[in-house]
Amino acid sequence: MALKILIAEDEEITLKHLVNALQLEGHEVTGVSRGDDALRLVEDRRFDVLIADIKMPGMTGIELLGTIRERNIETDVIVVTGFGSVGSAVEAMKLGAYDYVTKPFDLDELVLKVAKINERANLKRENVALRTFLGLNKQVSIIARSAGMKRILETIEGIRDSDCNVLLTGETGVGKSLLARIIHYTSRRQNLPFLSINCATLTEELLASELFGHEKGAFTGAVKLKQGLVEIADHGTLFLDEIAEMAPNLQAKLLKVIEEGEFFRVGGTRPLKVDLRFIAATNQNVRSAIAEGRFREDLYYRLNIMEIFISPLRDRRDDIAPLADYFLAKHLPRSNKKITGFSREARDVLMHYSFPGNVRELENIIERAIILEKTPVLTAPSLPQNIQLFQIETIQPDTVKTIEELNRTYAVKVVDLYGGNRTKAAEMLGISRTSLWRLLKEEE
């Protein structure tokens, strides 16, 4: 990844050689001959690396470094000192310099030091834990038992060599953020940053600052320059969750980033260039939002190069059992319990529940059940009462039941729910205890 480098060196020939050498490495390099000029630049712009000579007119390298640290300007500093002046280099290291080189120096040595800074920056920006998790193909296959999810993974496989923007749609909790990470970590940008933000959780002003950063003094409380996610994620992927909640003014700024690859920090006057892939997600009907004037149609088309709809969990019931097994394995280690699986009744209850909260709700249900369970298997009584009462009947000609049969089956379940207390069960069913007794007797 290219770094933004500032070189402060008063020897014209040396400055020229340094600029050329680092430009050949693909970096964006600016050169000045005075320390005070360098200070003005680092206060106005962001530089990843500052290479400063110890002795310069206007301001020495040591003074420049000290001022940068006092003002909390974030940049790695490499100082250049003359042979025999190692004491100055030691002083610079104490002030927070990243490294130093002595004159006359080997250009290859300096290039290597810059490369190490670049490598360290990339490591800081990567989400190593998520990349490791999603790199395990078996984790993906666990949640792709249904035909619908398999088609989605086939689509993701088909775009892995493309940088196209993607729009993920579907109900809350279906796993849009997880799929966004899978798209990134199976793409050509997988070793570059993946950052995300929920557009519905922040005010317009805060979201603008988080996305685009701000200049020092841009508003009250902006005591120093701040990089936004657009800038930090440069060359990687930015995931915008709940994109339909973004204010129209910010939508226009985002469109400029997508179309022209440039943006302004809040309070900034100079455009900054970025190379980003965008993945957006929403649980809303975007077409309706466009018709109502809440969402820009041109932004929709720029984000919707590839749209992937994730169906609700109730429509891909083949995924419920493997997801339940996965969440049991995920949360069990923290419980210090030995639960080997699900009872037949518990699994049947899960399979017949509608999961309005989708995968997120299923995970919460399993995590709660683990806490409550007191036996070696996860049983139905450990599941929430509301899902124990809920059943979906799949009607086939050979499975049609009479009203009496349905009443008996339901009555048995309610009695079991209240621990055999028939009086309480009759009260909840709205029938007399005698009527309940007759229903149960017919069942027997």
Image (cartoon, rainbow, N blue to C red):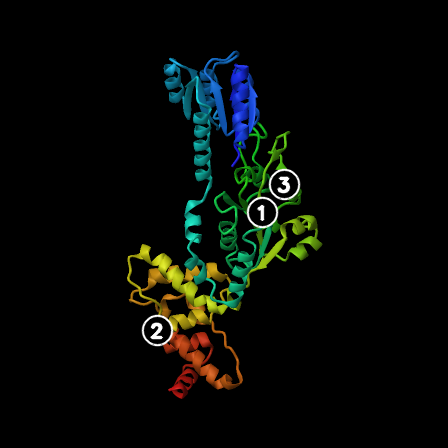
- Asked whether residue 223 appears in the rendered view, the answer is no
In percent of width and height, residue 279 lies at 57, 50
Secondary structure type for disc 1: strand
Seen from the viewer's position, the closer of residues 58 and 344 is: 58
Label 2: how many residues lie within 10 Å, few (<14), some (14-19) or many (20+)? Answer: few
Q: What is the C-alpha distance between the residues marked 3 and 1?
A: 10 Å
* Residue depicted at x 29% and y 66%: 376
For image coordinates 65% across by 49% down, the residue present is 302
> The disc labelled 1 sits on which kind of residue?
Phe
Q: Nearer the viewer, residue 219 or 59?
A: 59
Q: Which residue is mark 2?
A: 419
Asked if the residues shown at circle 3 and circle 1 are in contact, with their CB atoms under 8 angstroms apart, the answer is: no
Residue at mark 2 to residue at mark 3: CA–CA distance: 61 Å
- Residue drawn at point x = 35 percent, y = 61 percent: 370
Mark number, residue 257:
3
Q: Earlier in the sequence, mark 3 or mark 1?
A: 3
Q: Is residue 393 visible?
A: yes
Q: Amino acid at mark 3?
A: Val
Q: Residue at x 43, y 32 (%)?
A: 116
Question: Outermost residue toward the top?
Answer: 57
Q: Nearer the viewer, residue 423 or 240?
A: 240
Q: Is residue 384 above or below residue 267?
A: below
The amino acid marked with disc number 2 is Gly
| Quarter occupied by the C terminus | bottom left
Left or right side of 261 for 441: left
Quadrant hosting residue 348: bottom left
What residue is shown with label 1?
278
Q: Residues within 10 Å of mark 1 (few under 14, many from 20)?
A: many
Q: Please identify, in this view, whether the residue under mark 2 or under mark 3 is nearer the observer.
A: 3
The answer for how far apart the CA atoms under marks 1 and 2 are is: 53 Å
